[in-house]
Image (cartoon, rainbow, N blue to C red):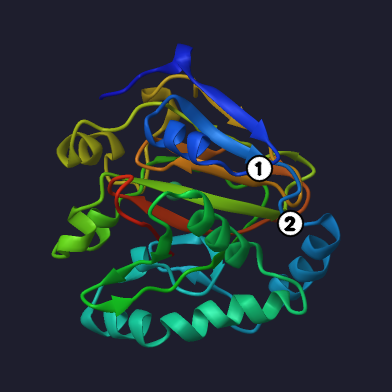
Amino acid sequence: MKNDLKENTFVSVTEKLTFEDLKSVIDGKCAAIHIKEFCSKKICKIVSKKLLTHSSRGNFNKASEIGRIGMAHYEIDSPSGFDFYYENAIANTWQLRELFEPYLSPVDKIRLLLEEVWPSGAQLEMLYGKKCFVGICRIIEPTIELLAHNDRLDRDAPESFQAKSLITQLSACIYLQVPEKGGGLRLWMKEPEDEMEYKKLRSGAYGIDIAKLGQPAHVIEPENGDLLIFNIRKYHGVAPGKGRPRINVGAFIGYRSIYQPLTYWS
Ligand SMILES: [Fe+2]
C-alpha cells in the first residue's frame, strides 16, 4: 500500500473553488475540499423529493444496495451495456439538468467552475471518440455502510488509451440530502500498490473491510447542499447512518497534467 500520509493531510473548508486547492488534492496534501451549501438547501429539498420518486430510478448493477438515476461508466459489463451507456450519455446528462430546472444544476456549476479555475480548462471526457455521461445521482438507504474501495477509470475501461493516460481521478460530490445522524465519508490517504493487492484485500467483495486498513484519516459529515472533492484513487467509504436516505449527485474528475484540461464524467 502506498501514500499513507495520515498525519500531514487536511480538509480545506472554503467558500471558493481554487486551482491551489484542487492541485493540493491531486498532490495528496489536502484530503478534501469542502464547500458549504454549494447548492442551496432550498433547491436540495425541492430536487430530492423529485429524485426519490423518479421513474428511471434503478440500482447499480454491480452494487445493488446503491440506487441511482443515470448510468455510471462503472456499470458497463457487456457490449450491449457499452452501447446503452454511450447512446444515452447526453440524454442522461440532460435528465439531471432538467430535474434542477429552473435552477442551475450543481453538476453544471462544478463543470463551469473547473473550466474557469483550471489553467487548461475542463471538458467532458471522451472515450473511444464518444462523449461520456456526467451527472450521476446516487440514493442510499441511511443504514448502509459502504466498504472502503477505490475507483479507477482504467479499471472500468481497460482498453482505452484515454483512460490509461489519467494520472489521478477525483470525485466531486454534492450532497442533496444526508442522514440525520452519521453516514460520514471516510477517507484514507492510501491506495493499493496495484490491482493484484486490491483484489487480494477485497477477498471477493466490492470493497475492503475497514479493519484491514485501520482508522480513516478523515471522516467528513457534510450537510445538505455541501460539495466535497476528494481523490478516489485513495480508499474511501461511507459510515452507516440513521434517518433519511442519502442522496448525492456528482462527477468524476480526471487529471493528466496542468497543461491539459481536466475531464469529467460519471
Ligand atoms: Fe467510490
Q: From this viewpoint, is residue 23 visible?
A: yes
Q: Amino acid under label 1?
A: Lys
Secondary element at tag 1: loop
Q: Residue 203, percent across and down?
A: 27, 39
Front residue of this view, candidates 226 and 108: 108
Q: Residue 183, percent across and down?
A: 66, 40
Of labels 2 and 1, earlier in sequence is: 1
Secondary element at tag 2: loop
Pointer 2 residue? 39
The residue that appears at 36% across and 53% down in the rendered structure is 254
Q: Name the quadrant of the N terminus.
A: top left
Residue 16's label in the rendered image is: 1
Q: Name the quadrant of the C terminus.
A: bottom left
The residue that appears at 53% across and 68% down in the rendered structure is 135
Q: Nearer the viewer, mark 2 or mark 1?
A: 1
Q: From this viewpoint, is residue 239 visible?
A: no
Front residue of this view, candidates 78 and 254: 254
Left or right of 245? Residue 210 is left
Q: Residue 224, percent across and down?
A: 76, 50
Q: Amino acid under label 2?
A: Cys
Front residue of this view, candidates 201 and 81: 81
Q: CA distance from mark 2 to mark 1?
A: 13 Å
